[in-house]
Amino acid sequence: MLILNVSLGARSYPIHIGPALLDMPLGSFVGRQVAIVTNDVVAPLYLERLTRPLKQAGILVTEIILPDGESHKNWESLNVIYDRLLAERCDRTTPIIALGGGVVGDLAGFAAATYQRGVPFIQVPTTLLAQVDSSVGGKTGINHPRGKNMVGAFWQPRLVLADTDTLNTLPDRELSAGLAEVIKYGLIRDLPFLEWLEAHMDQLMARDSAALSYAIERSCINKAEVVAGDELETAPQGGRALLNLGHTFGHAIETGMGYGVWLHGEAVAAGILMAVELSRRLGWLAAADVERVQRLLVRAGLPVRGPALGAAQYLDLMGHDKKVIAGRLRLVLLKRLGEAVTWADAPQAEIRAAIEACCE
C-alpha cells in the first residue's frame, strides 16, 4: 500500500493506494453511525465487503443505493440521500462514505458538504477516473440541464481509499475513460509521465497491476500538488484551473448530447484534442504534437472526434463554463507538451475552427 498526502493545513488528508483496501479498518474515522452512498452496479460487488467489518464493530450502517449513471447526478438523487439521512437520524458526526465512481463521489460529497452544514466525508473510489481525479481535491456537485457541475461546493474528504482490486471489474469503456484523465496530467505538467504513458499504454490497457498502480500514484501526486497550491481554484493564472484541460469542450459535449450518452472521460478526450488543435493554431504546438496526442488517445481506446453539434452550439454551451469570468471564456491550452496555460485571448474564429476540425 502506498500513502500520499494532500497538504491543506487543517484539511489535509491521506490517499491510500493499493489492493484489498476495502478490508481496511475505518474505526478511527467512524463513530457509532455511518452512511454509505453507492449505486446499483457497485453495491452487489463491494457494498457487503465494506459494511461487514463496520457492522461487526457494532456501528450502525445506513446504506443508500442510487441508480447508476451521469443522468442521475441531480437534485432528485441528492434529495434521496437527504431523506435517508434524516429518516435514520444521522447527526453532524455521522460520516458519509462514497463507494463508487465520480457520480457517486460528487453526489455524496455534496450531500456531506450541505447536510446539517457539513459532515465528515470519506471517498472509496471504484473506477480509474475516480481514483486518479474526482475523489481527490474536494470538488463536489450535481449537474444542471444548462451545464455540468454548475451546482456544488468544495468539501475535502477525511480519507481516500483507492482499492486497485476494484479495477478488475471495471468495463473496458470505463477503463479508457479513466485513462483520459491520466493522460491529461502528462500533457499539462509532467512530460516524463507522458513519455512513460506512451511506453506503457499497452500494459495499462491489458490491466497490468504494476502499471496501473504507478499511473494512479503519479496522477494523484500531480493532482495533490496542484490542489495544495490552489485549493479553491482562485489563482488568476494557472493553478487548479489547469486540471481542466479539455473539460470546457468536453462538458459542452456531455451537456449537448445529454448526460450519460458520452462518458466524462470520453468527452474530455475529444475536448483535449480540440484544445491541442487550438494550441497548434495559436502557434504553440506543431502538427506533429497534435498527431502524437491523437495517437496516444486512440491507443487508450478513446474518441478523438467530437459529436457534430455544430460550432455555434459548442460555443453557446461553453459560455456557461465555470471558467468564464466577466464574460470572457478562459480555456486551458498547451504552450508545449507538458506545460499548460489558461488563456482568454484566443480569437473566436480560431476556437470555432479548432472545434470544426475535431468533430465528426
Image (tube, helix red, strand yellow):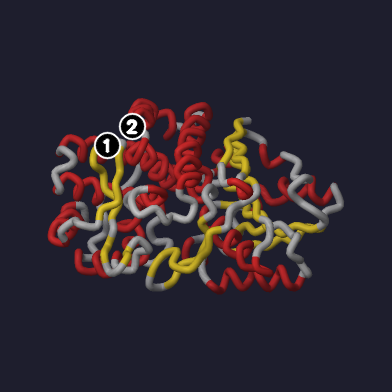
Amino acid on which disc 1 is placed: Leu
The three-letter code of the residue at mark 2 reads: Leu
The C terminus lies in quadrant = bottom left
Write the residue at 17% across / 44% down: 280
Q: Regarding mark 1 in the picture, which secondary structure is present there?
A: loop
Left or right of residue 345, residue 317 in this image: right
Residue 198 point in image, percent of width and height: 33, 30
Identify the residue shown where x is 54% and y is 54%. 138
The location of residue 172, given as percent across then percent down, is 45, 43
Check the image and report above or below for 30 versus 66: above
Figure check: 259 above or below 132: below
| Residue count near mark 1 (Cα–Cα under 10 Å), binned few <14, some 14–19, many ≥20 | many
- Binning the other alpha carbons within 10 Å of mark 2 as few (below 14), some (14 to 19) or many (20 upward) gives some
Residue 171 can be seen in this image? no
The quadrant of the image that shows the N terminus is top right
Residue 75 locus on image (x, y percent) = 54, 73
Residue 27 in the image: above or below residue 261: above
Reading the image, the residue beneath label 2 is 191
Check if mark 1's residue and mark 2's residue have beta carbons within 8 Å.
yes
User: In the image, residue 101 lies at what x, y percent?
Assistant: 54, 52
Mark closest to the chain's N terminus, 1 or 2: 2
Disc 1 target residue: 337
The image quarter in which residue 263 lies: bottom left
The residue sitting at 47% across, 33% down in the picture is 218
Which residue does the image show at 47% across and 40% down from the upper left?
Answer: 225
Residue sitting nearer the eye, 236 or 59: 236
Left or right? Give the position of 229 relative to 307. Answer: right
